[in-house]
């Protein structure tokens, strides 16, 4: 139906259908009033339709684009009203001129009252048709405008999301390469294992994350591999706890939304040799299909740099706003000796 309407609208078939219907209806009305054999039925039909079409198409193709679409509403309504008056007056004037020409024997001297009545009849008829066409055209115009605005907004969001995702890749690479550099001088065999693990992480980013949504199980697996990579360069003084859910559904999530918080935890975790250094990560899914992502890490008491000011966190905040509007909650707080992140996302 939508394609049929677009075809009819594109080639003005609906206009043709209306004018054919209007002509037949007008001719039927004239024949009822005057009889089928009346001389001026055809002439009046052509004359009336001509001035109706003149008024309609002047309003919708000249006045609408030039005034209404440019928000010059008063000018539009005044000029449209004057157009209807002018076409109604010309309709009456044409009848006064052509009747004596077609039928010279006819003594045609219409009174002012008759001309006034005829003018008002044409005015009401032309005004009705102009209003009808204008309403239809405006409805179609605003529907198209709304679709264009939605398309432009969708393209803008896609562009911004692609830019944010492109930012995320170098940010992750920078952190991971720092980890590998840390290991090269100390243990080359271990650095080789880390490179293999790093290539797996990179493959996930380059290929599996090239979609809008990825399975939650894959995203959790990515976090698990990243955590194992980070474990290699951290000492035994760091306790890492990762609690994962048993996935009963094939949940989907936008890729790389969780990793910035994990990166931040390893970046700001305390490194006291005799202290309680820890990172606790817990992922749960409630009965309403909301993902609860909680992460907490110890940090030095005198650290004043907030973990929510980095590029990765600012990036993921913006992505959450774009991807999960009104479907996420994010709370980041700095405690006395810990950072804490609570994130909730409505899963699909």
Image (cartoon, rainbow, N blue to C red):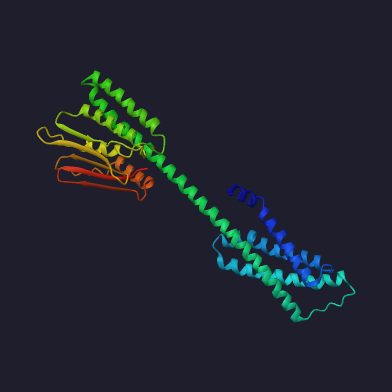
Q: Nearer the viewer, residue 15 or 262?
A: 15
**Residue 293, horizontal then vertical, whole percent:** 27, 42
Q: Residue at x 22, y 20 (%)?
A: 187
Left or right position of 55 against 143? right
Q: Residue at x 57, y 62 (%)?
A: 68
| Whether residue 193 is situated above or below residue 47 in the rendered picture | above
Residue 219 is at least partly visible in this image: yes
**Residue 106, horizontal then vertical, whole percent:** 87, 75
- Residue at the extreme left of the image, as rendered: 274
Q: Nearer the viewer, residue 295 or 333?
A: 295
Residue 217 picture quarter: top left
Left or right position of 197 against 93? left
**Residue 115, horizontal then vertical, whole percent:** 75, 77
Left or right position of 184 against 42? left
Residue 305 is at least partly visible in this image: no
| Whether residue 266 is situated above or below residue 335 in the rendered picture | above
- Quadrant, the C terminus: top left
**Residue 302, horizontal then vertical, whole percent:** 14, 43
Q: Residue at x 39, y 30 (%)?
A: 206
Number of marks: 0
| Whether residue 112 is situated above or below residue 313 in the rendered picture | below
Q: Residue at x 64, y 50 (%)?
A: 10
- Residue at the extreme right of the image, as rendered: 105
Residue 111 picture quarter: bottom right
């Amino acid at each position: 139906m939508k394609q049929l309407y677009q075809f009819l609208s594109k080639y003005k078939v609906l206009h043709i259908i209306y004018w054919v219907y209007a002509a037949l209806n007008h001719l039927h009305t004239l024949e009822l009033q005057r009889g089928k054999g009346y001389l001026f039925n055809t002439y009046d039909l052509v004359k009336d339709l001509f001035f109706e079409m003149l008024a309609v198409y002047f309003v919708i193709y000249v006045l609408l684009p030039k005034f209404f679409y440019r928000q010059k509403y008063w000018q539009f309504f005044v000029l449209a009203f004057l157009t209807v008056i002018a076409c109604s007056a010309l309709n009456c004037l044409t009848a006064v001129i052509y009747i004596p020409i077609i039928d010279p024997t006819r003594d045609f001297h219409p009174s002012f009252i008759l001309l006034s009545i005829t003018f008002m009849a044409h005015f009401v008829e032309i005004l009705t048709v102009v209003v009808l066409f204008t309403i239809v055209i405006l409805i179609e115009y605003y529907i198209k405008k709304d679709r264009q605005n939605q398309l432009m907004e969708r393209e803008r969001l896609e562009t911004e999301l692609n830019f944010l995702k492109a930012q995320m890749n170098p940010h992750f690479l920078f952190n991971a390469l720092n980890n590998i550099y840390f290991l090269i001088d100390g243990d080359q065999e271990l650095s080789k294992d880390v490179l293999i693990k790093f290539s797996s992480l990179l493959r996930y980013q380059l290929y599996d994350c090239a979609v809008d949504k990825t399975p939650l199980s894959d995203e959790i697996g990515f976090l698990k591999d990243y955590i194992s990579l980070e474990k290699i360069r951290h000492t035994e003084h760091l306790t890492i706890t990762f609690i994962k859910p048993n996935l009963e559904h094939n949940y989907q999530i936008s890729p790389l939304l969780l990793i910035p918080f994990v990166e931040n935890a390893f970046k700001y975790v305390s490194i006291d040799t005799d202290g309680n250094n820890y990172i606790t990560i817990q992922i749960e899914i409630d009965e309403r299909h909301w993902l609860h992502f909680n992460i907490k890490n110890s940090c030095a008491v005198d650290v004043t740099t907030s973990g929510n000011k980095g590029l990765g966190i600012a990036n993921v905040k913006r992505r959450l706003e774009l991807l999960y509007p009104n479907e996420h909650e994010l709370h980041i707080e700095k405690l006395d000796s810990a950072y804490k992140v609570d994130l909730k996302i409505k899963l699909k």
